[in-house]
Image (cartoon, helix red, strand yellow):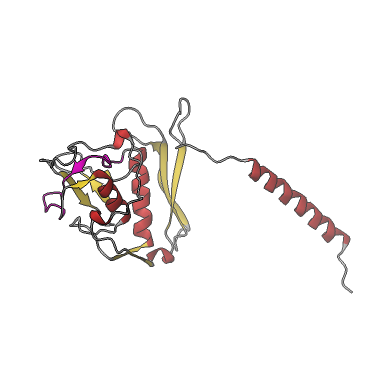
Amino acid sequence: MKTFRPNIARQLLLTGYLVSIGISAAQAVTPAQVPLYVGVTAAKPNIMLMVDSSGSMNGLVTMSSTITSPSEMPSDFSYSCPASNELGNGTTPPAIPTKPIQMTISPTGTVQVCITTDCKKPATFGSRSNGRCFTNTKNYTVSYYNGSTLAGSPYTGLQLNWYFSKALFQSGSLASVKSTSLSRTTIAKQAATDLVLSLTPSSGSAKVRMGLARYYDSEDAGALLSEIKDLDA
């Protein structure tokens, strides 16, 4: 019969005690319930984006969808678009808008809304901070920037909010696609870009400080790409 030596037993007891302390401390932590920049009056939050640069990030992620038109919106769909994000140029049904909303699709398939005539700095579609979405009860006509109008327009804002939040797209058209494949790196970069845009103030002082780093690189294991500093407009 095997027996533990006294010193090993003591080590196990000490390890168990330390683990129990760690678990208790972790359970006592309450995650932030609001965006980090909300209500900040003193020190700005420091955010470090760390992007995995290992070989596995080159793998492809394939997504599929059966959505072909905003008119397919389920009857029980609902969408909350903050007043600050609502787009103008909508009309009360059954009136037809005379000026279309110009939109574009990024190379990664992200839906964007032109907020300037040259569409150089489009806003990401959605209800997040600094995003743009449609007033549910209004009618809208939408078109690709300097391109064709979405077939079947006008649609209600609710239909468009469903379509652009659920369907898949490729750069060059507002027509949905059945499937798309992107590398994990591309998806991570787009997620980081969306986060930065949502935290970047349109004017005034920075709300947060942000930096960028990569890790698991085959040569240096990790690197600081940009030190933490104010995220200005």
Indicate the position of residue 104 as horizontal and vertical percent values: 20, 50
- Magenta region's main secondary structure? loop
The N terminus appears in which quarter of the rendering? bottom right
**Which residue is farthest top?**
41
Q: Quadrant of residue 97?
A: top left
The magenta stretch spans residue 66 = no
Indicate the position of residue 228 as horizontal and vertical percent values: 42, 39
Which region of the structure is painted magenta? 131-151
Indicate the position of residue 174 as horizontal and vertical percent values: 20, 55
Describe residue 101's horizontal placement relative to residue 66 as left or right: left
* Residue in the image at 19% along x and 37% along y: 92
Residue 139 at least partly seen: yes
219, above or below 189, in the image:
below
The magenta stretch spans residue 134 = yes
The one nearer the camera, 73 or 216, is 73
* Residue in the image at 18% along x and 40% along y: 93
Q: Quadrant of residue 200?
A: top left
Indicate the position of residue 94 as horizontal and vertical percent values: 16, 42
How many labels sit on residues? Answer: 0
